[in-house]
Image (cartoon, rainbow, N blue to C red):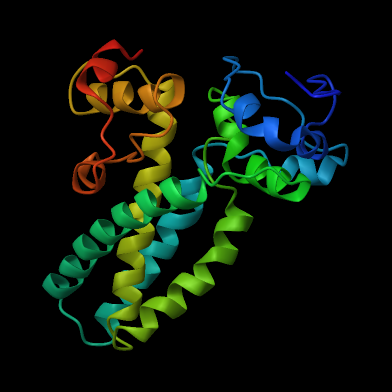
């Protein structure tokens, strides 16, 4: 954990330390520490609290929003069948968003102080401490902020009565994603497809971190050629 003359002190808040690693940050952050006890991020207690989220907060907060979105489309004249199709399409669209974000944003290469700091907060902390159960799902406050641009993006390509249904489907896809992600790290599936997905995802963490970006599905890894080799997948944890 030494980069040039700088050493990260794991007993102190990490967020404002990791930027000092500069070009060595990428190597450091992809050397996982396997412990269910997560590190402290901030000295400030309020900021620290906002970085920690119980997995069940995701469905508790967002499923009522999904319900409101779907019921709104129905109240605006859409049939249940039409709304069901919107949900399916929204979930499908989310799987692509999930892949694109994970591959191109969460795994962006950084080396500047603020670049490293931002990346660590966004995704680097998850690779450094992959079993930290309180930092596996996206904090609700941050997710709420991101809802606005996604809602407005959908509005550009849909009608007023389909926007809520499509957004609700995508949001449901997000809820499925975050709950699945938590389960892949802390659950013990005994049969496929969950057992295969767990092996597939842990392979991404501990063996080939430049492949296997899908969480809820391997579909887009197949499409875009980012499947890990069969041999590596077979050896995964």
Q: Residue at x 30, y 52 (%)?
A: 95
Q: Position of residue 157 (x, y in %)?
A: 31, 83
Determine whether, in the image, residue 104 is placed left or right of residue 46.
left
Residue closest to the eye, 76 or 120 = 120
Quadrant of image for the N terminus: top right
Residue closest to the eye, 222 or 36 = 222
Q: Position of residue 34 (x, y in %)?
A: 57, 14
Determine whether, in the image, residue 102 is placed left or right of residue 225.
right
Quadrant of image for the C terminus: top left
Q: Residue at x 36, y 22 (%)?
A: 203
- Asked whether residue 38 is in view, the answer is yes
Instruction: Identify whether 158 is placed above or below 41.
Output: below
Quadrant of res 207 = top left
Q: Residue at x 75, y 50 (%)?
A: 114
Q: Position of residue 2 (x, y in %)?
A: 76, 19
Residue closest to the eye, 9 or 4 = 4
Determine whether, in the image, residue 123 is placed left or right of residue 162.
right
Quadrant of res 189 = top left
- Asked whether residue 59 is in view, the answer is no
Q: Position of residue 162 (x, y in %)?
A: 27, 81
Instruction: Identify whether 106 is placed above or below 198.
Output: below
Residue closest to the eye, 16 or 147 = 16
Instruction: Identify whether 66 is placed above or below 28.
Output: below
Q: Residue at x 35, y 66 (%)?
A: 168
Give the total number of marks visible in the rendering: 0
């Amino acid at each position: 954990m030494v980069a040039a003359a700088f050493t990260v002190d794991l007993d102190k808040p990490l967020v404002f330390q990791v930027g000092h690693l500069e070009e060595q940050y990428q190597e450091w952050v992809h050397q996982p520490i396997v412990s269910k006890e997560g590190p402290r991020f901030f000295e400030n207690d309020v900021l620290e609290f906002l970085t920690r989220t119980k997995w069940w907060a995701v469905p508790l907060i967002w499923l009522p929003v999904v319900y409101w979105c779907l019921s709104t489309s129905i109240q605006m004249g859409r049939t249940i069948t039409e709304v069901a199709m919107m949900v399916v399409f929204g979930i499908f669209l989310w799987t692509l968003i999930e892949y694109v974000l994970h591959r191109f944003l969460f795994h962006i290469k950084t080396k500047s102080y603020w670049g490293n700091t931002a990346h660590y907060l966004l995704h680097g902390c998850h690779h450094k401490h992959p079993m930290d159960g309180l930092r596996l799902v996206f904090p609700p406050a941050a997710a709420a902020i991101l809802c606005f641009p996604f809602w407005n993006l959908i509005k550009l390509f849909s009608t007023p009565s389909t926007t809520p249904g499509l957004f609700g489907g995508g949001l449901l896809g997000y809820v499925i994603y975050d709950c699945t992600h938590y389960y892949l790290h802390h659950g013990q599936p005994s049969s496929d497809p969950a057992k295969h997905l767990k092996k597939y995802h842990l392979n991404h963490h501990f063996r080939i971190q430049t492949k296997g970006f899908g969480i809820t599905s391997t579909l887009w890894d197949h499409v875009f050629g980012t499947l890990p080799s069969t041999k590596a997948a077979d050896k995964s944890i």
